[in-house]
Image (cartoon, helix red, strand yellow):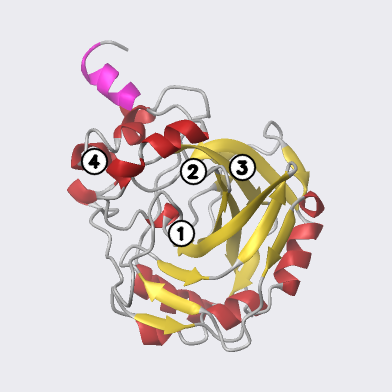
Amino acid sequence: MKSVAILGSLASLASLASAFCAHGTTLFPRASGDEVKIATYGFHGMNGPLNWYGLNKTLNAKCAQGKEQSPINILTKTLKSVDGSSLGFDIQSYDNGADFVNLGSTLEVIANGTLKLDSKEYKLAQFHFHTPSEHHIDDEYYPAEVHFVFQAADQSLSVVGFPIELHGRNSDFVATVFEKVDKIKEPGSKGTTGKLDFTKLRDHLRRSKVYQYKGSLTTPPCTEGIAWNVVRDPVTIDVNTYKAIKGIMKFNSRYTQNTPGEINLLDNAANTLAGKA
C-alpha cells in the first residue's frame, strides 16, 4: 500500500488500542502523559491472528485479504538480500537508559535514531520484541525477534528486524535492554532500560546480510507497504534472560504469511470452505 493510502486510514487508526508495530508513529501516536495503552487484540483464540479481521472488519481487512502480509518464511535462495553496510542504521546512546514500557502485547523501548535506506531517511519511533521470532529463515524460527520501527517524512514505514538466538551469554544489546525488565512485569507498567550503546549492534548489522521485501505490520490493522529489512545473523540471549522476557510477553507472534503477492492464507481458507478453491 502506498503512503497515501496509509495516510487515508489515520482517522480509523486513532481508535485502535495499541497497534504496537506502528506505535509511536503517525499511524498510532503515543498516549500523552504517563498513560500506557494496553492492546485490545491478542494472539490466542478469538482475539488471535485468525480472527483479527473479525475484531474490526473495516479497519483490519488487510489482515485477512492483503496479499503483502508479514511475517514470512524467508527463502534465502530467492529473496533479495543486501549488505548490512548499505543501511544507515544510527541509534542514539542513552547513558541513563531509555524509557521501557509493557504494552500488554509486547515490551517496547522508546528511543531516537535514524535509518537511511535507498536515499530516504527514516526516524526511529520505537523498538519492540516478539517471542518467538515472527520471521522464519529457510523454515527455521528463532526464540525471539526485535523490530526497530522507523517512519519517513512522507509517513512511509521501514522496519529492521534482528532474530535473537539462545547462547551461553547475552549480546551487549540484549544484556543492557533487559537489565531491569523485572520492573515492568505488569501490562501498563513503565520503567527504564540499562545504559544503551548501539555501536556493537550497528557493527553486527554491517557485517551481516539483510533480506528485504515489501510487507505489512504484523499486528492489526496489518497495514501494507512496509519496507522490511530482516538481518540474517542473530544477536544472542542467554537462557535466564530469555525465560524472563518470555514469562512477561508470553507468546506474541503472528503466524507466517503467504509469499508476497500471493493470496492471503485466510482468504484462501475461506474460499476452500466455500468450495471456491
Q: x and y percent of residue 98 in the render? A: 53, 79
Q: Name the residue under label 2.
A: 71
x then y, percent, for residue 258: 47, 31
Q: Please, what is the three-letter code of the amino acid marked with disc 4?
A: Asn
Does 182 lie within the magenta span? no
* Nearer mark to the viewer, of 1 and 3: 1
Instruction: Give the Cα separation between the discs numbered 4 and 3.
Output: 27 Å
Residue 43 relative to residue 82: left or right = left
Residue at image location 71% in from the left, 34% down from the top: 77
**Within-10-Å neighbours for mark 4: few <14, some 14–19, many 20+:** many
Q: State which quadrant residue 223 falls in.
A: top left
Earlier-in-chain disc, 1 versus 4: 4
Q: Who is closer to the viewer here, 258 or 120?
A: 120
Give the extent of the magenta segment: 267-275
Q: Are marks 2 and 4 in contact (CB under 8 Å)?
A: no
Give the structural element (helix, strand or loop) at label 1: loop
Disc 2 or 1, which lies upstream in sequence?
2
> How far apart are the alpha carbons under marks 2 and 1?
12 Å
Which residue type does callout 1 highlight? Pro
Q: Give the SS element for disc 3.
A: loop
> Is 37 on the left-hand or right-hand side of 146?
left
- Of circles 4 and 3, which is in front? 4
Residue picked out by circle 3: 138
Which residue type does callout 2 highlight?
A: Pro
Q: Where is residue 207 in the image (x, y as percent from the top left)?
A: 81, 59
Comes first in the chain, label 2 or label 4: 4
Q: Is label 4 in a helix, a strand or a loop?
A: helix
